[in-house]
Amino acid sequence: MKFRNSIKRALAIMLAFSLVVSFAPKTTANAAKAKIDPFYKTVELKYNSHGDSTYMGAAKTFTDGLVINAKKKAKYSIKIKNTKVAKIGKDKSKNAIIYSTGLGKTKATVYEKVGKAKKKSIGTFTIKVTGYELPDVVSDSVYGDTVMSIGIIHMPLHLGVKTFDAGDYIDNIILNNKTTGIKFDKSEYNVTYSIQHVDDMYKYTDEDSSSDATSTASMDASRDPLCANVDDKGLVTALRVGDNTGLVCHITFNDGTYYDEKLNIEVTDTSIVKAGTHNINNIRDYIVGLDTPVDLADGTKAPQICFDNASTTPAFTEVQDAVNEEMLTYGSIGRGFSQKSNHCTDVYKSTRDKVLDFLSADHEKYTCFYVNSTTDGLNKLASALIESKDDLVLTTRIEHHANDLSWRNRCKVIYAEVDDKGRVIYDDIEKMLKKNKGKVKLVSVTAASNVTGYVTDVHRVAKLAHQYGAMIVVDGAQIVAHRAFSMMGDINDKTDDIDFIAFSAHKMYSPYGGGAVVGLSDVLNKHLPTFYGGGTVKLVGDDWEIYKEAPATYEAGSPNYPGVVGLGKAIDVISDVGFDDIQAHEKKLNKRLIDGLKKLPNVIIYGDTENIDDKVGVVTFNFTDVNTYFLATELNDLGAVATRRGSFCAHPYVWRLMGIPDEKISTYEGCADAKSPGMLRVSFGIYNTEEEVDQLLELLPKAMEETKKIQDKYDAAPEF
């Protein structure tokens, strides 16, 4: 596969030179004056304290295009002013490369020397070095029919074991790098593995940047013994607790190209962890605003403890950075004729594939269209799939309003009940499907409750729906940040596959108004949502129009590009942390809070408090003698603890759990005042800690005491 000029230029901006280095650009017989290509007016590099941009490409790619009208007999060199920003090195083929050494800007001067004449400057260009989160370098790692280094990639790994299969890790990077569109086979490359001291891993000299240059330094007897070893198959074995060990994976392709993949290794008492990556233990370092102080009632300030993550989540720092970075190259999506427009269109389209992969959706069977929120997605589905007021939809009494009102205002809706603990009654779903003898068009259920945290067995519901001729729609708002979700069910039984799911990005640490619907392409193509406009049509005449296929028909108007960028990056980070760890962490927080609440007088905890395996991180409760409307306010004023109080846009479900009949509810003026019934909800994010739970439990008695004084004043004692 030949490199295209556009690919070469796109990658070229990742390179630079330092000190003085000679190079041989392409020459011309043209008598025109040699000059720097304006394309290289500013060369952008990336830098991270764990490494630099040395392994971002080959110097030849850069120098070929740097000088225009280069003379055949001339020699050209580059001198970089500030070597604290960029510096010279060499790759294994002895090609000169320039890599970032720190953040900032510096000037680089290009000199021309002809024969014995003094060298003269033909111009300068700027090198700009900005920071990057390590995983960001993956996307441009593989291009053409060769591999240029991926750089230093830190992908999260918390294995809970004493070994780490680096061979499998490397295979996954090379074989499954879907951002490139290049397919490789295991027979095309060979990998050798070596262990180094981390201090030696990222050293580059003016003479040689190869990993061999520092291999002997790792054996320095004055250093602590390395904490891990590796065999020739890439199996890393823990030797002792520590974080001083680095793994170098040297990959050689059959065509002679190569790259090095470098990993930091930390051995804990129970597992091998890739150091410097996202995991439950360090995820707080990647949350925006955690340390931002808020005002307390006594005039002091304190960082907020956020237990309202079922409502919305704070942003990941990577999400914020990615959105800010993309704004520098923002252009119209799909319709522009510019570099920025083309770039944004590529990101927009590639994120669709990322969403499909995140939900284990077959690309041939499903498509993805973007929405503003889960509510928006469910309404678009309802507007498209419901064709008559007589259509019948089956849902349940556990649902959020978004998965109830979207249907009940368009067609007939019937409801399966919940049991006395608040769980969906699957037998009731089957009973109603059987009773209506194939008339149910859609079964729409939540994947996880925003009130009790119960996780619905949606594949069981899908199997029932399909058995009786219905399709299934899933409200995925409360599942995507908490549990792995797959559109595909049993590999040997396609009847339990999911047909449609809608979810929001703001529930998964990307509060930029993004979200997505993943659904069956063939079904979506047979319907149109009641949202029309630009981007949805192929042609429009005076009194006719021809519509495109999904997903375009579901995305009228200018897209929310920041929402899409944030969604894609949030998927990266959550996937890095890993759903097994997220689930275990949330269960631990749930149990700690439930156990602590049980020690308080007059508490009512809703849902099952013993069997909590089928719950995401949500706990709702009340006190028989305390108005939780005022209690939520006191928790915030006294200790900056953010909770949620009310009925959580799931009124019928909340009233059932509280034992309040429908006719009683109709006497209340609303759902958000002190005299309306409601619960207090604590909902966890992956960044919440057991220490924060303890702070809440410690604060509750004082907050309850203050609340009782207030509720007496307002005659607002609870009615249960």
Image (tube, rainbow, N blue to C red):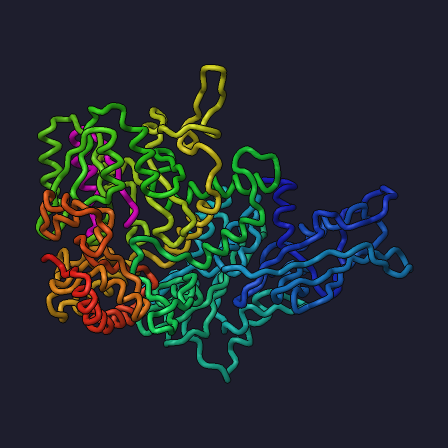
Reply above or below: 425 against 523.
below
Where is residue 141? Give x, y as percent: 54, 51
Q: Is residue 458 covered in magenta? A: yes
**In the displayed structure, does residue 37 sit left or right of residue 352?**
right
- Compared across the picture, whether 104 is left or right of 49 comes to right
Q: Is residue 182 visible?
A: no
Q: Residue at x 35, y 29 (%)?
A: 529
Q: Where's residue 75, x and y in %?
A: 82, 56
In magenta segment, residue 217:
no
Quarter of the picture containing the C terminus is bottom left
The front one of 636 and 65 is: 636
Vertical placement of residue 26 versus 220, above or below? above
Quarter location, residue 241: bottom left
Residue situated furthest top in the rendering: 543
**Can the viewer see residue 287 in this picture?**
yes
Is 534 in front, or is 93? 534
The one of 485 and 378 positioned closer to us in this rendering: 378
Q: Nearer the viewer, residue 517 or 709?
A: 709
Total numbered labels placed on residues in the image = 0
Q: Position of residue 184 (x, y in %)?
A: 48, 45
First to last magenta residue range: 454-478
The residue located at (35%, 31%) in the rendering is 521
User: Vertical placement of 112 versus 469: above or below?
Assistant: below
Answer with left or right where residue 310 lies relative to residue 246. left
Please identify the quadrant where the N terminus is shown. top right
Which x, y percent locates residue 58?
64, 54
Residue extending farthest right: 117
